[in-house]
Amino acid sequence: MVNVDEFIEEAKAEIAEEIGDKHAVIGLSGGVDSSTAAALAYEAIGDQLTAVYVDTGLMRKGETDEIRETFDYMDSLRIVEAQDRFLDELEGETDPEEKRHIIGEQFIREFETVAREVDADYLVQGTIYPDRIESEGTIKSHHNVGGLPERIDFDGIVEPMRDLYKDEVREVARALDLEEIISERMPFPGPGLAVRIIGEVTAEKLEVAREANHVVEEELEEYEPWQALAAVIGKATGVKGDNRVHGWVVAVRSVESRDGMTARAQELDWDTLQRIQSRITGAHENVARVVYDVTHKPPATIEYE
């Protein structure tokens, strides 16, 4: 386990040295990784940092309002409304890796736009060790590692937490006095709900995925999973009222893990699973089935794409 106090001082010194008297932007998603990196950078360089939250339209329910309230102490916080741009870029794309690269490139373009406005030369990221390992090993591309485009209009990228595991990041977040809603938050993928939708990302699938994930996080809070999620994985026949429907299939996943490199599917109470399926199928008329994923990692990954 990392010595938290030493790490914080060394990370702040590294950030200050790399950026010097210039300006930097950081992509702030609201997850523990980017939030902790933002807090470190803000302590290191203050108003030389502009935190950029990009509302991609792929975020969790209520995410944008939560970010606005949690990080209002950062005077330079920027909230960018980019939902239409991301959906337009993703239209028609079904390949998982291509979706990740499209999202990664669009993120960078959004950051570059803000960087030009504030005359920033550096990009700070909340990349952690498992991100690098999985991207280097081609398990998947992370938008802040393997999903970056070849052309990046920054003098440098600063990744102060590149050698930390998730549980170590949480320790740093607590030491920085970040709110519990951030420090204890379940992991959420950089590409957002796009990797919880098999195939093309559409407005309808996003609506289903957003509500289903909200239900799962609420219902499974007492189980304290390392990560719990819902994914739209395809269509199947069902019955709604007196009508036969060909509706969406939602897969529910809840796992225990230390660092995300391996994970075990949780054993959930039957009544809990029934309550989840009832809420999800009741929330959207076009959801026909809810299934529970019992696969460990490996052989599966935690996310679906």
Image (cartoon, rainbow, N blue to C red):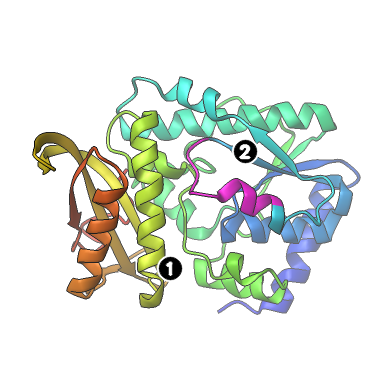
Q: Which residue is mark 1?
A: 259
Q: Could you tell me if residue 260 is visible in this image? A: no
Instruction: Examine the image and state in which quarter residue 52 appears.
Output: top right
Q: In which quadrant is the N terminus drawn? A: bottom right
In the rendered structure, which disc, 2 or 1, sits on the residue that comes first in sequence? 2
**Spot occupied by residue 269 in the image (x, y as percentages of width and height):** 21, 75
Residue nearest the observer in this picture, 36 or 74: 74
Q: Using the rendered image of the protein, determine whether residue 135 is visible from the camera's viewpoint.
A: yes
Can you tell which mark lies on residue 113? none
Measure the alpha-carbon separation of dots 2 and 1.
26 Å
Q: Secondary structure at mark 2?
A: strand
Number of marks in the rendered image: 2
Taking 40 as reference, is 258 left or right? Answer: left
Horizontal relation, residue 128 to residue 233: left or right: right
Residue in view at x 12 percent, y 38 percent:
236
Q: At x 24% / y 61%, what residue is drawn?
A: 298
Q: Position of residue 273 (x, y in %)?
A: 22, 66
- Which quadrant, please, contains the C terminus? top left
Q: Which mark is residue 54?
A: 2
Three-letter residue code for mark 2: Val
Q: Is residue 157 above or below residue 95?
A: below
- Magenta residues span 57-68
Q: Nearer the viewer, mark 2 or mark 1?
A: 2
Which residue is located at x 67 percent, y 57 percent? 37
Q: Residue 108: where, in percent of width, then height?
A: 61, 32
| Residue type for callout 1 | Asp
> As drawn, which residue projects farthest toward the front?
242
